[in-house]
């Protein structure tokens, strides 16, 4: 089924225009992604298409009710799995009939779906949820399990249009692979909002949202990225040429003005020598001044036009490409032993140890390590043991003296929500930078003056990430270890690229928990500590 969107406008409750006059179409059976920076309205657009939100104006024409897999699942905590799947009425009707309550109402509600219970069980089983029943409260499930419940709904309902908002966020690698395989063969129309580049490369079209509207690219993400890089190079070259032309025009304008002024002075002197009357001289002077003014106006209009063109080109070039962070790598010593665990294990009160056998591993400075394991395998606990936030109940752990680390979690929780952007960065100003230097640093990380007084609680995931890195920059703090725990989960594709670029430049120890294989490959992560099996020294 196709989708037709005409002149769509949405305004936030705070009266801020999120987007306006969006017009585009999606072909039947298409597999496409809506991409763009945080804050342009991708998820809002998807919710309008899912009929969860109403636009201020415009129309969305869809041939049938779409099926929506939301990004944020906490709102379903008070529902059962059956209620989340919108199948509870049919199940209740079936159970009532089986109890002997064969009423017209129950029969109409069931609508000949006599095998509905088996269908629900089969759909849940397909997504590795055989241990979950329709009566299970959603609040008892993990984030990944909640996502799988909604994915099971696709299997159950077989809708013609599927809308997915960050469907792989909470899934491990096996779960992601299952999503990729399922969507590859699904016959309906698929629209996703995602930063998962592996998923995006399985889509055949990109719809890029920006402040200027929406633009269609009939290609997967890698091809789109190449196209954008070519556009960037072309615009950069155009900008350089226009700046050279402006400089030349400014020089020519200055020389022309100086020449005109010299000519006017010579004219005045010659007129005086010839004894021309004062009135006539005044007329000549006025003509000269008018001529100079006209020349100046023409030159200024030309320069103004060139300046405006340069500003337009600059605004079309993503500032994200200009972000740099200067890690002072000279303080880092390659090959230094940072952490060593021998027979290390941990048990919460009243619980058995997390791992079947104690963990043995050594972490050296400069290594890039991936920490793997299924949900519940103890990855977060292990990270806390590594840096000393928890202490082992069995075995030992060695940490280098004065171990300096930074923990970048999914929420970038080193950012305090009660602070403004400027207050947050100032709190990390261990290098005693002047206020204007702090503000320069904020601008480098795309925080303009208009955002300095913004509360951190109102920042998007990508903005929180950039602010966290800006804090490191201001503090001149090059950590021995950066721990990144699913750092790409809540940020858009542009900010994923920024984070990747910055971490690639970092020369200290990097420990990453991530299921984003593209992200890991680009960071050149080679060593693995696995919690899916007993860890051995060679890991």
Image: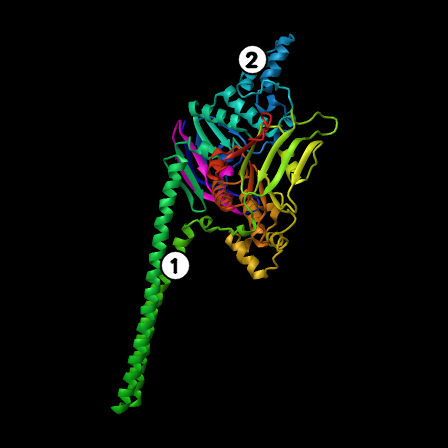
Binning the other alpha carbons within 10 Å of mark 1 as few (below 14), some (14 to 19) or many (20 upward) gives few
**Secondary element type, mark 1:** helix
Instruction: Check residue 18 for magenta coloring.
Output: yes
Relative depth, front residue between 275 and 426: 426
Percent position of residue 221, x then y = 41, 36
Q: Residue at x 45, y 32 (%)?
A: 198
Relative depth, front residue between 205 and 60: 205
The reply, left or right, for residue 146 in relation to residue 266 is right
The Cα–Cα distance between marks 2 and 1, rounded to whole angstroms, is 66 Å
The reply, left or right, for residue 184 in relation to residue 112 is left
Q: Residue furthest top?
A: 100
Q: Residue at x 34, y 74 (%)?
A: 293
Relative depth, front residue between 530 and 108: 530
- Vertical position of residue 417 compared to residue 196: above or below: below
Q: Which residue is mark 2?
A: 118
Q: Which residue is mark 1?
A: 308
Q: Which residues are magenta?
A: 16-45
Viewer can see residue 451: yes
């Amino acid at each position: 089924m196709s989708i037709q969107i005409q002149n769509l406008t949405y305004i936030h409750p705070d009266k801020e225009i999120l987007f306006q006059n969006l017009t585009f179409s999606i072909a039947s059976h298409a597999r496409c992604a809506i991409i763009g920076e945080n804050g342009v309205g991708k998820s809002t657009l998807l919710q309008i298409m899912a009929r969860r939100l109403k636009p201020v104006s415009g129309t969305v024409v869809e041939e049938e009710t779409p099926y929506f897999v939301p990004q944020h699942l906490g709102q379903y905590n008070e529902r059962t799995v059956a209620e989340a799947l919108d199948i509870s009425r049919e199940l209740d009707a079936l159970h009532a009939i089986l109890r002997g309550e064969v009423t017209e109402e129950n029969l109409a509600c069931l609508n000949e779906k006599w095998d509905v219970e088996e269908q629900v069980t089969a759909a849940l089983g397909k997504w590795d949820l055989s241990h979950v029943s329709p009566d299970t409260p959603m609040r008892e499930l993990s984030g990944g399990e909640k996502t799988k419940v909604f994915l099971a709904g696709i299997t159950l309902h077989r809708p013609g249009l599927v809308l997915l908002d960050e469907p792989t966020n909470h899934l491990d690698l096996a779960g992601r692979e299952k999503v990729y395989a399922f969507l590859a063969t699904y016959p309906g129309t698929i629209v996703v909002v995602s930063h998962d580049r592996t998923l995006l490369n399985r889509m055949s079209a990109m719809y890029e949202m920006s402040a200027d509207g929406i633009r269609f690219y009939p290609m997967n993400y890698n091809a789109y990225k190449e196209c954008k890089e070519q556009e960037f190079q072309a615009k950069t070259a155009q900008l350089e040429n226009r700046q050279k032309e402006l400089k030349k025009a400014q020089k020519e304008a200055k020389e022309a003005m100086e020449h005109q002024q010299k000519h006017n002075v010579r004219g005045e002197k010659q007129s005086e020598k010839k004894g021309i009357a004062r009135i006539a001289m005044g007329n000549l002077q006025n003509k000269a001044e008018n001529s100079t003014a006209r020349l100046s106006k023409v030159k200024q209009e030309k320069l103004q036009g060139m300046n405006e063109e340069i500003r337009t080109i600059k605004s079309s070039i993503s500032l994200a490409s200009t972000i740099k962070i200067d890690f002072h790598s000279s303080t880092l010593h390659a090959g230094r032993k940072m952490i060593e665990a021998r027979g290390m294990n941990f048990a919460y009160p009243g619980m058995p140890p997390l791992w079947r056998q104690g963990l043995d591993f050594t972490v050296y400075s400069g290594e890039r390590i991936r920490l793997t394991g299924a949900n519940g395998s103890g990855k977060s606990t292990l990270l806390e043991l590594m840096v000393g936030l928890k202490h082992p109940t069995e075995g030992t752990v060695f940490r280098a003296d004065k171990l300096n680390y930074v923990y970048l979690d999914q929420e970038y929780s080193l950012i305090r929500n009660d602070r403004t952007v400027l207050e947050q960065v100032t709190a990390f100003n261990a290098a005693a930078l002047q206020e204007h230097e702090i503000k320069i640093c904020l601008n480098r990380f795309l925080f303009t003056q208009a955002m300095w007084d913004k509360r951190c609680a109102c920042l998007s995931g990508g903005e929180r990430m950039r602010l966290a890195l800006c804090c490191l920059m201001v503090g001149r703090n090059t950590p021995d270890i950066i721990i990144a725990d699913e750092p790409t989960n809540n940020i858009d594709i542009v900010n994923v690229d920024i984070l990747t670029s910055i971490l690639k430049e970092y020369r200290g120890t990097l420990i990453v928990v991530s299921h984003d294989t593209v992200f890991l490959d680009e960071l050149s992560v080679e060593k693995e500590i696995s919690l899916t099996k007993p860890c051995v020294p060679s890991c």
